[in-house]
Amino acid sequence: MSISTIRRQVKNVAYNFSDAQVKVREATSNDPWGPSTALMSEIADLTHNPMSFTEIMSMLWKRLNDHGKNWRHVYKSLVLLDYLIKCGNEKVAQQCRENIYSIETLKDFQYIEDNRDQGMNVREKAKQMVSLLYDEERLKNERTKFMMTRKKFMSGSGISSDGSVRHMRKSDIGAAFESELEDARPASAGEEEMQLQIALVLSREESEKEEELRKKDDIGLQVFQKLCF
């Protein structure tokens, strides 16, 4: 478990965050990977609960106001909002339109880290969302298409509406896998760049962990040798 995850869990308890708020915080964390489709789907379902809806949107607007080194909070909040607009309560899109200025300002988001323009990811996503929110017909079509795809995936995964698992055919599994694979593909050059950066970060962290373990092993061996000799 990473330090950031532990820190987030401590805050969840200290601030007595609700289940909905905890899920949003997890989906929009600073961890160098995107929110899972499963987690976003859970949050989308929660938007149909009046109290959870308020908690989810409040947390998202707060995350969208972050800046600087917390650019991942902002980017992931846009990713989650985009998902909720298409798959959650229709009130999500309504509230986004009412507060569209908060999203439009992110088209100018700036942050440079290690000589990389991390703000590009935020700017691109903000532009896509603003364009979608201003086009009611396209948004309606996107919601219809997205809900149908989600329903097919749930069916292909062998999960019924009551949560029970059904028998799956190979063709169903293949279709579900293809759908999930398509969703995972980057929608723009900005998202593709972010995925590459995430892969590099994970690779670097893995190397650092291996180096740390090697050093610990060396120290342990030295202590053992001193005790024996």
Image: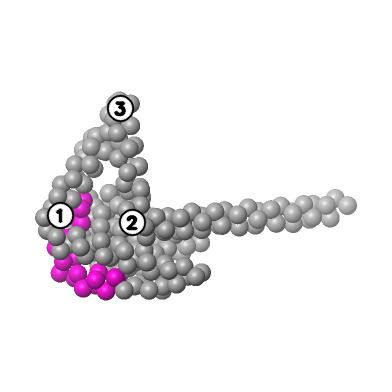
> Which residue is tagged 3?
171
> Which residue is tagged 2?
188
Q: Position of residue 39 (x, y in %)?
A: 32, 50
Q: Where, by quadrant of the figure, is residue 168 drawn?
A: top left
What is the three-letter code of the residue carrying label 3?
Ser
Label whose residue precedes the other's in the sequence (1 or 3): 1
Label whose residue precedes the other's in the sequence (1 or 2): 1
Q: Taking 195 as reference, is 108 left or right? A: left
Q: Residue furthest front?
A: 189
Q: Is residue 42 magenta?
A: no
In the displayed structure, 22 sits above or below 154; it is below
Label 1 to label 3, Cα distance in Å?
Answer: 31 Å
> Which residue is tagged 1?
138
Label 2 to label 3, Cα distance in Å?
Answer: 30 Å
Residue closest to the eye, 192 or 93: 192
Residue closest to the eye, 164 or 189: 189
CB under 8 Å between discs 1 and 3: no
CB under 8 Å between discs 1 and 2: no
Name the element at disc 3. helix
Label 1 to label 2, Cα distance in Å?
Answer: 18 Å
User: Label 3 crowding class (10 Å Cα cut-off): few <14, some 14-19, many 20+?
Assistant: few
